Amino acid sequence: MEKWKHKRKIYWKLRTQLLVLFLVLTIVPLIIFSILIYRNSVKSITEQAQGYFMQSVEKSSVIVDKEFDYIDEFAQKLNIDSRLYEIFKNLDKTDEVSLMNANSRITAILNAYKPWGSNIYSVHLVTSYFRFGEEDKNFYPKGAFMNSRLEKEAREAKGSVCWIPTYSYTDMFGINNLTDAQVEYGSLFTAVCQMNFCDVSSGRVERLRESVEKPILVINYTEEFLMSLIRRYGAKDIVSDADYLVIDREGNVICSSDPAYGASRRYQADWLGTLKKGTNSGYTTEKDGRERYMVTYAQSEITDWLVVARVPVHLLIQDVERNIRSYIIAIMVILLLLSAVSSYMISRYINRKIYGTIHMIDQVGTGQFGSLITYDDRDEFSFFYEKLNEMSRNIKALIYENYEVKLQQKDFEIMILTIQLNPHFLYNTLNIINWTCLAGDTPKASRMIVDLSRMLQYTSQSRKQLVYLKDDIDWLKRYIEIMQIRYENQFEVNFDIPEELMEKEVPKLFLQPLVENAIVHGFKNSEERGILEISAETDEENICFTVEDNGAGMTQQRVKEVLKFTGTSIGVANTDRRIKILYGEAYGVSLHSQLGEGTAVVVTIPK
């Protein structure tokens, strides 16, 4: 007891000295210094980031306006194009040929007005009776467009361009037999304008008659195009994980780099509801779950949409944290220099003690589980060394108990199953040869004896449990020849095994019990000629061997008995047990049978 108290006193004394030394020299000053730097840096970085992201969204908003600025001019030019005026003035909407000819001319006019290098996905003039423009883009079901939101807002705008946020194509036009993913125009945003064509070539304005339906100009863009603009000019160089969205003032998403706010969804935030009309730009913060976001936004003058940048606050200050770590390292260097003498003496003393321990641990790690530390009982680390030696001895005992004993048990089980298999097969084969001899057919008996001798040579020449499949199949074919002689070719056997599997290693004689059961029990009392199919197939992980016959089959109760070593047949259960011992419980034999229809036995092993 006194010896233990002395060891414990020295242990606590050493640990206390080390703890106090590092607290005084490093931890306390570092904590105080880090807190001051962190607070000042976070404030400075946040202010800088707000300004930078504000510039980014304003620049993105200007780029968006630049891309869409020509849409109003585009619509106005179309309105005063005399060719369109003449086409719709004289158009017979009941004549299919007339509509097709008009579509060809209108498509050419629309393409001519599209600016060079335009990013427009498609442009159409839509009426209740025909859709004029590119035929391979944006199919509208008959009557669906005239009842849609696009048509309604275009009519209400009365000749002004109206921008429709990104919408679902199938939802907008009531299509139930398709999904948006099945069409390339499944998600678009659109500019619409009700047209009122006129002719000014004569010096005065001539408009279409009131009876002529005014077509609606539909200009479509993909959300990918708009998102590519935002990504190109966004502040990704500052924070790579910043998310950019384009939304309208109701929160409808036009495009987004954040999968959580996909197109045609809504972006909900408290600041959006309090945003006053006419506010062009600003910044705020919001909370999404546990994460706080800094949000900056700027309004597009053309579409009235908002370009929004969202960035988690913790990403803004990650540089601050890196800087603090740098400061800590610098301070640690200084402190280490100041305390070099004292720390050197302590570390030298401790290192001498732990070198032996590390060496012993390395030996245990390489499998030398009997390694022990030699020490003096008067050493203050003697208790520690004693525990390590005890651990090494316990590991060695556990290795023997849980590894070597189980390996011996596994080998013993495989040996028992193999011994059980060979006499069972030999007994049946010798009976077959005996019957053949009694029948007086000595040539057949001779061939059977030759085949049997070669089979016995194969089974006895090696005690290995795993053999090449090609050798096992050769053995099995000899066995089948013996059985066909015995049963006077009352059955036929077909092999369907891929050539590339022949070099695989398989359990020795694993198919023989299954073939024997099929011949002896499956074809028993069968009036039809027996057919036995032996096949193999593979997937990414496993190989499945199938032995299938067209014999008598069996009941489900009998199937359970065969797989549980009950009844007279042990071959299937024997094979199943061998495979489970070799490969694990995930592999083995499955049996499928129907009374009067035959039996299929599937053996699964790892590839």
Image: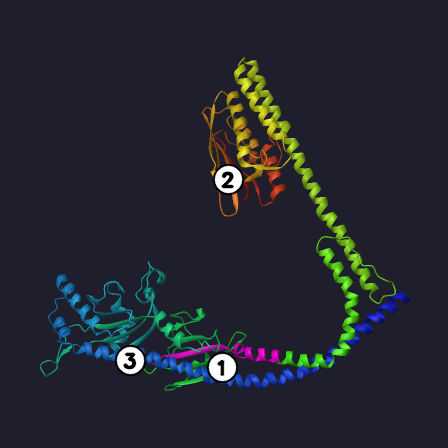
* In this view, 457 is above or below 66: above
The reply to whether the magenta stretch includes residue 292 is: no
What residue is pinned by disc 3? 69
Q: Amino acid at mark 2?
A: Leu
- Secondary structure under the numbered disc 1 in the rendered image: strand
Tell which residue pokes out farthest to the top in this image: 440
How busy is the neighbourhood of tag 3: few (under 14 within 10 Å), some, or many (20 plus)?
A: some
Please provide percent x and percent y for residue 454. Answer: 58, 26
| Foreground of the two, 260 or 347 | 347
Tell me the residue that label 1 is attached to.
285
First of labels 2, 3 by sequence position: 3
* Left or right: 276 in relation to 468: left
Q: Residue at x 44, y 69 (%)?
A: 259
Label 2 sits on residue: 501
Count of numbered circles in the view:
3
Residue at left offset 42%, top offset 78%: 308
> Looking at the rendered structure, which numbered label has been put on residue 85?
none
* Residue 60 seen in render: yes
Where is residue 474? Give x, y as percent: 53, 30
Q: CA distance from mark 2 to mark 1?
A: 64 Å
